[in-house]
Image: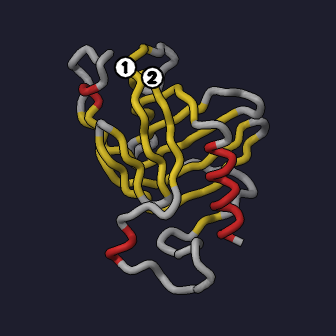
Amino acid sequence: MHTFKDIAEITVGYNYFVDSQQQIDSKILNKNSYKMSYHVSEVAFNGGDNFQSFNEETWVIGDKTIITPHGNLQIEDTTLLEQGTLVGIQFQVNGTFRMNEFSCSNGFENDAEIKTLALMRQPNNAWLWVYAFDEDDMPIANFCGHDDLDGLASYVSILESYSK
């Protein structure tokens, strides 16, 4: 796990969207209560900086699941990040990305077990960066895209307000 200073923890499985302390039952747990859209069109395999373009796609970043055309990730834990000028969210996740399904893939990328996914943005910057890591904290891929207007800010704001 990556270490970030002074970051508020969010309790996964707690229903922040109602005024009760009850846990979400397992039937509802698989449904996102809140979500944002992430429009992504560039990837750098193996966490490098050699970004390649692919056909734009939309990922759904929820409070319980991250849904992509290349595999879904179950969110196990969430941490709000504020590191210098970078702000965002780090997710501890469980799931697989089928890396060779990206249209820019050369066909040699393997399926990757994702354990950490971080969404990061610098203030006043339109680009939203996503970093994917495996269980050994090795970079799998970096993604470049954008959210809908104020998507990340609204998402973080709601998570922060319900975590207090």
Question: Please, what secondary structure does the residue beneath circle 2 have?
Answer: strand
**Amino acid type at mark 2:** Ser
User: Are the two marked residues, 2 and 1, in contact with CB atoms closer than 8 angstroms?
Assistant: yes
Q: In this view, does 106 lie above or below 115?
A: above
Name the one closer to the observer, 129 or 115: 129
Instruction: Find residue 56 and report its image quarter.
Output: top left
Residue 65 in the image, given as x and y percentages of width and height: 40, 55
How many discs appear? 2
Quarter holding the C terminus is bottom right
Instruction: Find residue 136 and report its image quarter.
Output: top left
Q: Which residue is found at the position 65% from the left and 37% from the top?
A: 149
Q: Distance between the residues labelled 2 and 1?
A: 6 Å
Residue that sits furthest to the left in the current view: 107
Is residue 69 toward the left or the right of residue 3 in the image? Answer: left
Residue 59 in the image, given as x and y percentages of width and height: 42, 39
Query: Tag on residue 18?
Result: none
| For marks 2 and 1 on the same chain, the one whose residue lies earlier in the sequence | 2
Query: Tag on residue 41?
Result: 2
The residue that mark 1 highlights is: 55
Residue 67 in the image, given as x and y percentages of width and height: 37, 47
Q: Is residue 77 above or below residue 69?
A: below
**Amino acid type at mark 1:** Asn
Identify the coloring: secondary structure
Name the one closer to the observer, 67 or 110: 67
Name the one closer to the observer, 164 or 2: 164
Q: Which residue is found at the position 76% from the left and 34% from the top?
A: 123
Q: Which residue is found at the position 57% from the left and 36% from the top?
A: 147
Q: Which residue is found at the position 32% from the left and 48% from the top?
A: 72
